[in-house]
Image: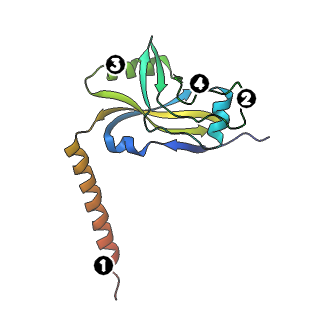
Amino acid sequence: MAKEQGRKVVASNRKARHDYLIEDTYEAGIALMGTEVKSLRMGRASLIDGFAQFKDGELWLEGVHIPEYVQGTWTNHTPRRRRKLLLHRHELGRLEHKTREAGHTIVPLALYFKDGRAKVEIAVAKGKKAHDKRHALREKQDEREAQRALSTRGRDY
């Protein structure tokens, strides 16, 4: 069997980019059980309520839902269990230092396979206020309208 190549996205957290101001991103490995990997290969996962936190000097991913493997037996996993993130020691130190600042947290942005290995893209993020969210939506809408106006400008009806 040939080795997998490239990046296959399983789940992405688009709401995180709306709710948080993303400051820095990291790619981390994730320690999974066999049935979790099989469930992910079927393309099933949800990052909606996910977050990461430090416990005893290690980074743990919590709140991520990977449903039970349908054909699994008694060895199946629990869907919302805590999963260990695999990073280099200097990256862990940098992340821990940044999350000590007020208002900062670590959120998962995407869960994917890279060359056959499960990876998660995490970000150090700061929560947005309601007025910041409205402002970002307004800017996005204005940009979309400007592009629409430019595209119809050259047409003759």
Where is residue 152 shown, x and y percent of the image? 33, 77
Q: CA distance from mark 3 to mark 4?
A: 23 Å
Which badge, 4 or 2, comes first in the chain's sequence? 4
| Quadrant containing the N terminus in the rendered view | top right
Decide: is 42 above or below 90: below
Q: 32 and 93: which one is in front?
A: 32
* Mark 3 neighbour class, 10 Å CA radius: few under 14, some 14 to 19, many 20 or more: few
| Amino acid residing under circle 2 | Thr
| Residue at mark 1 | 153
* Mark 4 neighbour class, 10 Å CA radius: few under 14, some 14 to 19, many 20 or more: some
Which badge, 2 or 1, comes first in the chain's sequence? 2
Please say if the residues under marks 3 and 2 sit with CB atoms less than 8 Å apart: no
| Amino acid residing under circle 3 | His
The image's colour scheme reads rainbow
Dot 3: element = helix
| Amino acid residing under circle 4 | Ala
Q: Residue at x 54, y 25 (%)?
A: 81
The residue lying furthest to the top in this view is: 56
Where is residue 60 shown, x and y percent of the image? 48, 22
Residue 73's label in the rendered image is 2
Q: CA distance from mark 2 to mark 1?
A: 61 Å
Q: Residue at x 56, y 27 (%)?
A: 30
| Residue at mark 3 | 97
Q: CA distance from mark 4 to mark 2?
A: 20 Å
* Mark 1 neighbour class, 10 Å CA radius: few under 14, some 14 to 19, many 20 or more: few
Residue 31's label in the rendered image is 4
Please say if the residues under marks 3 and 4 sit with CB atoms less than 8 Å apart: no
Q: Residue at x 26, y 50 (%)?
A: 136
- Look at the image and tell me whether residue 49 can be seen: yes
Q: Residue at x 33, y 33 (%)?
A: 125
Which badge, 3 or 4, comes first in the chain's sequence? 4
- Look at the image and tell me whether residue 115 can be seen: no
